[in-house]
Image (cartoon, rainbow, N blue to C red):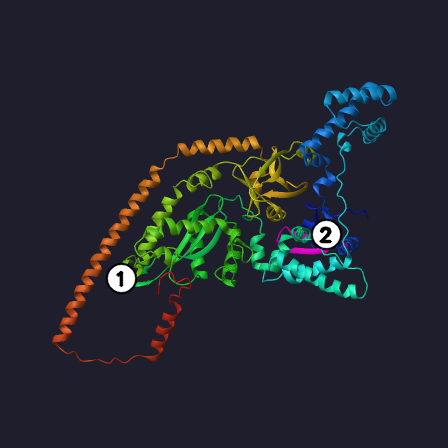
Amino acid sequence: MKTFPPKPGARYTIGHHTYEVVSIADDQISLCSLVNQYRRYLDHATFSTLEQRGEITLKQRAPVDYNMAANYLSLSEKDKKSYNTKLRYVCTALEKFGGRLPVKETKELIYVIRNETQDDTPPAYSTLARWVSIYLTNARNPLTLLRQKNRGQSKRVNQRAEELSKHYVETSYLTLERPSMKHSHELFKGHIAAENKTRFSEQLPTINPLSYSTFKRRIHKMDNSYKDTKRFGKKASRKLNKFGGHLYMSQNPFDTTFDSQVMDVMVVDSEGVAIGRPTLSAHLNPLTRRCCGWDISLGAPCAEKMMRATVRAIASNGKMSTITSDNGAEIFNIWAQSTFNLLGIKTDYVPIGDPDAKAHIERFFGTVNSSFCHNLPGTTKSSPTDRGDYPSEEKACLTIENLREIFKDWVDVYHDTWHSGIFTSPHLKHDSIVKEILPPEQPSEEELKTLCMSIWRVRITAGRVTKKGLFWTGPGLPEIARRLKKNEKAIVYFNPCDLGTVWVAHPNSPDEWHPAEGTRADYQQGLTLSDHDLILEALRSEKVTFNHDIASEKLYRLAEKIQNMRKKAGKKKSKKQKSDLDESAGHAAIEQPILVASVDITDLAEHQKTYVTYRQPADEDDKNGE
């Protein structure tokens, strides 16, 4: 079985999972899973053994291996000029002499081309003859004239010094105490100096330690995810080296993402006493950003609140085919699963501890707090620092029913407000998708895509590259980002005929291509750059003609309603305070007898059980300042 040496950008199948080679440093091959972002570190010997056994199978070779056009695009401007000059020598010789190259005439031709191109290193007759032979042997493929990159040889180092340098990198630098490279190198040099004294007394050759620059270079070549795991821990390493934005976004305008969150506002009971912060359970369609269904109630999130929000969503927006949520108990339970099976609704769960997987609804909750809750009487703001000295409990005057009523009006305002993520309002976006059909994709040949490629130079942020409002992500991007210098940009190879996939490379290694898939695959696959520019222009012009007065008028009416509720609550509190004063005065004049009523213990237990069930849990963030 023919095998190929692993290169960055190549993809392999290991145990039914696809891994991409992220980096290769010395004897370590770093691989990252495309689905769950698991990391694997293998040495070359182990990798070769597993590949021979069939436990590791090549799924996709690196672009520079199967596509010679990638090698051409990876060349520097100087190398491209040299290649074009070489191609001119070959093509001119064949055009003038055919397959035979007379010595005298060929040398004269080389002299003429040298003067025309100002070539400082013209080829000899034998060199040109070899080029012509390679060109004709490969069916006149011009890319076969590309010079193979010489990787060079690493500096020979004493084996004992090599072992000690690796030892101090692992036992000193790659620890949770995170010492500096200089400190680890000093320990390494101290060990060499102590060992050299013993060697000198025993008349053995001494060992030359690695210089600090070589020691530092070895560490920089190591996989950044591996180093971060050793120095910062697994959780911090996943955060530093994460890639990917949102998970697959369904094009169905009825599918929803569900989540729950405590609102930043205090509500009161019928007597005007603050009873805590309510919980908002909501369904959001990621494609249109519409809040399809919601529920506001006191207490922690539960299956009943989730189901009420689901029923509201189905009644107002139609039955969704899939609900995406986290692994919370309110949706991950037998009752909810049985109900969804009866309704024919599928459930999809995002990875645990990955808030980016449901970023749209997280952003919606942020909008609810900043645009709605923080403007209400009794708001707790986002933190005690933001709240300052504002007395949330004293200012609270909205009951849970009042909050539901004005939230319903606010949702209408939100649906008619311009959304920067979709370049229109959620209502208009929903109506346009329901009425229209998405354009078909335009497949093309892989080789033609590569030959039509152009280059962008952009920065890498959070494992993604961004251009013209589009996002691409891949497992190799965090590694490239960590190796970039300050204000240095990565090379992005893209095909203007298809923006579904791009390839990203470091400026110092432009031939190491890392594929990055579009985060909006259904939109970006087959999308041309010109069409995308036209769409962006149309969306910008639509924003100019967008009627902002509708949302502004609704927001004005909502503010009036809140003000009226505030006044009514103020009058109610005044009457209650006056009645309390009259009652206290009556008690001072006449001593009232104490009546003891018989209480059934069973009823008392039921009452206590009900109270415990609906008791407001303590706020861990201390947003209420209690």
Q: Residue at x 56, y 30 (%)?
A: 530
Q: Is residue 189 above or below residue 221?
A: below
Q: Earlier in the sequence, mark 1 or mark 2?
A: 2
Q: Indicate which disc residue 26 carries.
A: 2
Q: Secondary structure at mark 2?
A: loop
State the image coordinates of residue 573 (x, y, percent, origin top left). 22, 61
Q: Is residue 452 above or below residue 346?
A: above
Q: Residue at x 16, y 78 (%)?
A: 592
Q: What amino acid type should be assigned to the residue bearing mark 2? A: Asp
Q: Nearer the viewer, residue 58 or 453?
A: 453
Range of magenta residues: 26-44
Q: Decide whether residue 149 is among the magenta residues.
A: no
Question: In the rendered image, which quarter is residue 623 located in?
Answer: bottom left
Is residue 441 visible from the viewing direction of this image?
no
Q: Is residue 202 left or right of residue 306?
A: right
For the C terminus, the image quarter is: bottom left
State the image coordinates of residue 491 (x, y, percent, origin top left). 62, 39
State the image coordinates of residue 468 (x, y, percent, origin top left). 53, 36
Residue that badge 1 annotates: 272
Count of numbered marks: 2
Q: Residue at x 43, y 38 (%)?
A: 424
Q: Is residue 302 left or right of residue 470?
A: left
Count neighbours of disc 1 (C-alpha within 10 A) and say few if under 14, some if 14 to 19, many if 20 or more: some
